[in-house]
Image (spheres, rainbow, N blue to C red):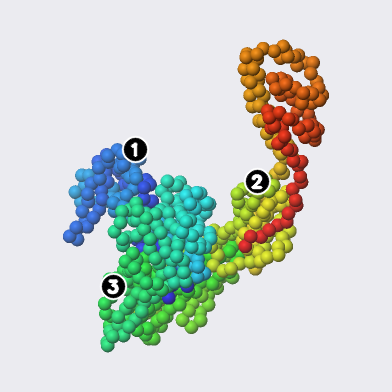
């Protein structure tokens, strides 16, 4: 079975994979990095070298600054700056005196690692869901790291957790990407998930370089079908065993399968002796199987029940390990260690038994229980066993992310009556269990008819929905912080204003048209009636005599239209007389609808 209940997390973020140590730096591909020369007495002849081994001999190659991508600053104690980092810059660097024939590094060597950012997809607990993680190939030296998530190229949210906050279902048309704050221009290639079944799921990458086993240009998209389950199958063949890496869906050429012997990279085993004390595991891309022994009584294995755990602040969590050991071995100790990724210099910390932290041993399993979780508990947890023959552990360990609850409004926390508003009880990572949520408005629980989920939909929103919202999980006491929703009322004069504007748009062009027609008619046959004094015509006269006026004098009617202050009076005046002439027909279609009060609506839940 796939480790972690089909949630195995194997990241290049860990020390044992990347070789990151105290004198190592991990920087993002495409970014810039400064390497400082720690020589106590730097000379003007100091410079930088790369270090390599050739025929068991250390060889140093001098680096020459080009003033653009590579710079060496004598004013800054011979600090070397490398811009636009590339994979070829991954190397061991040394600051030394160019005249030193012994090639001694001043202050020691520095290992530079170049991280590639990508979105990794892992099978989740549900049969039709997966989880996403913003992963780099080594733990970035720069901290703290803030992750930014994008959906369909649009900014979604930012958080300190590398895990996407929700589980994903099959949405081929939806793409996801991530970046680090401050390096938004260096986004990971977009991914989309399709063909999600109980056995497999297909991931499409926007860049071909994500499919290492396929021969295609880097800028072209590619797809990989991943299994939900990976396990090592042993087949006895006389005095030997044959091993196979079996998966829950058919293997394809696009999949890269790797083997591990005693947790070290190994070629694919052909035959293994039945008396072998070694353990084996395999992986499809970043999805790993459990370790298996050829003969259980001869070897050690350590596995975890879950390798990724998302837990709420204030709750309790059980981190479980399972191990096998030779029948003739006596254990000296069984210990749990905490490795905090945000503080690489701190290293591993031995966990001791306290009022909040407990250990339980049952048969060949060992359980670490942490109560009243807080944000500082977010870390990697590793189980180690020690005997007379040595020490065994399973790395990577269990990644625990402790999250709080936060209320998020979409599209905004300030809306207008009639809009649709979605409230989300948001977490920093996808919770593994189905939770029942309780929503509060102004500290009062909302009595909703349906089962309450992490989403609350107000459609349409009204002024009665305005206030302070908070949420919590039903089984926990602690709720989220309150967040205010502001609902603005619609202006009652809006429709009237629209009617007046519409009337003006009809009156003004028609007046201009008739004025031009009048001018053209007057040129062809001058008439004395056009000299009528407009000041002597009252509005009452216009409406009384409108049907008797000649066409040539229509400009008198239009130029003397006045808009009364009373909306109903205007409506009745225009409706009271149906003009006969074709030029006056626009008046017959003008309608003003009285403003109505929006119907009061209740809270709706969208599940």
Q: Tell me: residue 76, above or below residue 348.
A: above
Which of the marked residues, 3 or 2, is nearer the chain's N terminus? Answer: 3
Q: Residue at x 65, y 46 (%)?
A: 414
Which of the marked residues, 1 or 2, is nearer the chain's N terminus? Answer: 1
Q: Residue at x 27, y 87 (%)?
A: 239
Residue at the far bottom: name it.
Answer: 238
Q: Secondary structure at mark 1?
A: loop
> 439 and 382: which one is in front?
439
Residue 364, position in %: x, y?
A: 46, 81
Which of the marked residues, 1 or 3, is nearer the chain's N terminus? Answer: 1
Residue 318, position in %: x, y?
A: 54, 72
Q: Secondary structure at mark 2?
A: strand
Q: Nearer the viewer, mark 3 or mark 2?
A: 2
Of the 4 image quadrants, the one containing the C terminus is bottom right
Residue at numbered disc 3: 268
Q: Residues within 10 Å of mark 3 (few under 14, many from 20)?
A: some
Residue at numbered disc 2: 414
Camera sees residue 146 = no
Label ID, residue 75: 1
Q: Nearer the viewer, mark 1 or mark 3?
A: 3
Q: Secondary structure at mark 3?
A: loop
Camera sees residue 197 = yes
């Amino acid at each position: 079975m796939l480790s972690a209940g089909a949630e195995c997390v194997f990241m290049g973020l860990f020390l044992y994979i990347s070789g990151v140590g105290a004198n190592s730096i991990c920087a993002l591909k495409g970014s810039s990095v400064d390497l400082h020369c720690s020589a106590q007495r730097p000379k003007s002849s100091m410079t930088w070298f790369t270090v390599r081994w050739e025929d068991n001999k250390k060889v140093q190659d001098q680096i020459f600054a080009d003033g653009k991508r590579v710079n060496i600053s004598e004013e800054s104690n011979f600090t070397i700056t490398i811009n636009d980092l590339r994979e070829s810059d991954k190397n061991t660097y040394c600051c030394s005196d160019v005249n030193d024939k012994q090639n001694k590094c001043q202050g020691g060597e520095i290992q530079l690692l170049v991280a590639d950012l990508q979105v990794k997809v892992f099978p989740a607990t549900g049969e039709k869901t997966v989880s996403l993680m913003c992963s780099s190939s080594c733990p970035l030296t720069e901290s703290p790291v803030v992750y930014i998530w994008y959906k369909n190229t649009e900014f979604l949210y930012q958080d300190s957790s590398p895990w996407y906050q929700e589980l994903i279902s099959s949405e081929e048309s939806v793409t996801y990407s991530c970046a680090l704050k401050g390096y938004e221009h260096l986004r990971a290639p977009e991914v989309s998930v399709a063909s999600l079944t109980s056995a497999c799921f297909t991931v499409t990458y926007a860049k071909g370089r994500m499919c290492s086993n396929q021969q295609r240009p880097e800028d072209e998209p590619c797809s990989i079908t991943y299994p939900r389950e990976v396990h090592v199958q042993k087949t006895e063949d006389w005095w030997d065993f044959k091993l196979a890496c079996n998966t829950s869906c058919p293997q394809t050429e696009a999949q890269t399968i790797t083997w591990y012997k005693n947790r070290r990279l190994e070629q694919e085993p052909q035959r293994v002796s039945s008396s072998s004390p070694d353990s084996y595991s395999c992986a499809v891309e970043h999805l790993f199987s459990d370790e298996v022994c050829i003969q259980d009584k001869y070897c050690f294995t350590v596995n975890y029940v879950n390798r990724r755990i998302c837990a709420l602040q204030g709750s309790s969590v059980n981190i479980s390990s399972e191990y096998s050991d030779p029948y003739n071995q006596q254990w000296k100790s069984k210990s749990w260690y905490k490795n905090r990724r945000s503080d690489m210099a701190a290293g591993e910390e031995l966990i001791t038994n306290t009022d909040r932290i407990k250990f339980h041993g049952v048969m060949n399993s060992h359980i670490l229980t942490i109560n009243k979780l807080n944000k500082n508990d977010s870390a990697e947890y590793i189980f180690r066993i020690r005997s007379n023959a040595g020490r065994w552990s399973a790395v990577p360990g269990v990644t625990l992310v402790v999250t709080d609850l936060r209320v998020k409004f979409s599209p905004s926390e300030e809306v207008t009556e009639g809009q649709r508003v979605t409230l989300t009880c948001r977490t920093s990572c996808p919770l593994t269990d189905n939770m029942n949520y309780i929503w509060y408005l102004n500290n009062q629980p909302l009595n909703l008819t349906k089962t309450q989920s992490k989403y609350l939909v107000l459609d349409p929103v009204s002024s009665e929905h305005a206030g302070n919202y908070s949420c919590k999980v039903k089984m926990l006491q602690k709720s989220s912080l309150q967040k205010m929703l502001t609902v603005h009322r619609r202006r009652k004069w809006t429709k009237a204003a629209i009617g007046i504007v519409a009337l003006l748009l009809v009156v003004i062009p028609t007046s201009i048209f008739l004025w031009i027609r009048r001018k053209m008619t007057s040129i062809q046959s001058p008439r004395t009636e056009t000299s009528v004094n407009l000041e002597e015509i009252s509005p009452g006269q216009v409406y009384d005599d409108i049907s008797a006026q000649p066409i040539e004098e229509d400009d008198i009617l239009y130029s003397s239209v006045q808009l009364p202050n009373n909306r109903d009076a205007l409506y009745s005046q225009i409706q009271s007389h149906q003009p006969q002439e074709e030029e006056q027909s626009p008046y017959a279609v003008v309608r003003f609808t009285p403003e109505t009060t929006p119907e009061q609506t209740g809270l709706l839940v969208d599940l």
